[in-house]
Image: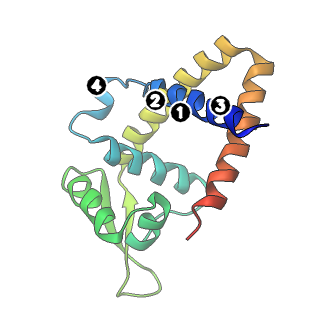
Amino acid sequence: MTNKDQLALTQELFQLMKQLPRPKLKQSSVDGLTRSEYELLVMLVMSTKDGKGAFTVTEISNMLQITPAGATHLINPLEEAGYIERLPDSHDRRIVRIGLTDKGTQTAESLISEVQENLIGLVNHLGEEDSRTLIRLMSKSIEFFASQFKN
């Protein structure tokens, strides 16, 4: 592939990526929450399903790829609104863990259901073969970007 072909492909890909809309969520699911706050709730509920119940601020900041101060900035209003709670660590009293309340879990699961509905629509639109191709290409893209942006 020539440099000219590469440039043309990257420009086309860039233009397509700019056009990709963010799914609109039902307002009742996100009342009073910022996109970052509900992304944190979803990340926590999905990680909790993987077997871990509560996380340190540092663990949360690593998962979200933000600073611990940025994570705290997200955590504080969610705690005040009753979505998450601070919990003592069972092995070390100096450590505070962040866990979901029932309200936080219900909200996150509602958001996940909405996203799944959107993805079912996409799979139905693309069909099985194109959906599998999209998954394969997105996986390869994630691998590439993960290797490019390692610290």
Residue 37: where, in percent of width, then height?
32, 48
Q: Amino acid at mark 4?
A: Gln
Residue 103 visible to the viewer: no
Q: Residues within 10 Å of mark 3 (few under 14, many from 20)?
A: few
Residue marked by disc 4:
27
Cα separation between marks 2 and 1: 6 Å
Residue marked by disc 2:
18
Residue 14, numbered label: 1
Residue 9, numbered label: 3
Q: Does residue 21 appear to the left or right of 80 in the view shown?
A: right
Q: Secondary structure at mark 3?
A: helix
Pick whichever of labels 1 and 3 is earlier in the sequence: 3
Residue 141: where, in percent of width, then height?
67, 44
Pick whichever of labels 2 and 4 is earlier in the sequence: 2
User: Which of these two is toward me, 34 or 78?
Assistant: 34
Residue 66 against residue 107 in the figure, above or below: below
Q: Are marks 2 and 1 in contact (CB under 8 Å)?
A: yes
- The answer to which quarter of the image holds residue 50 is bottom right
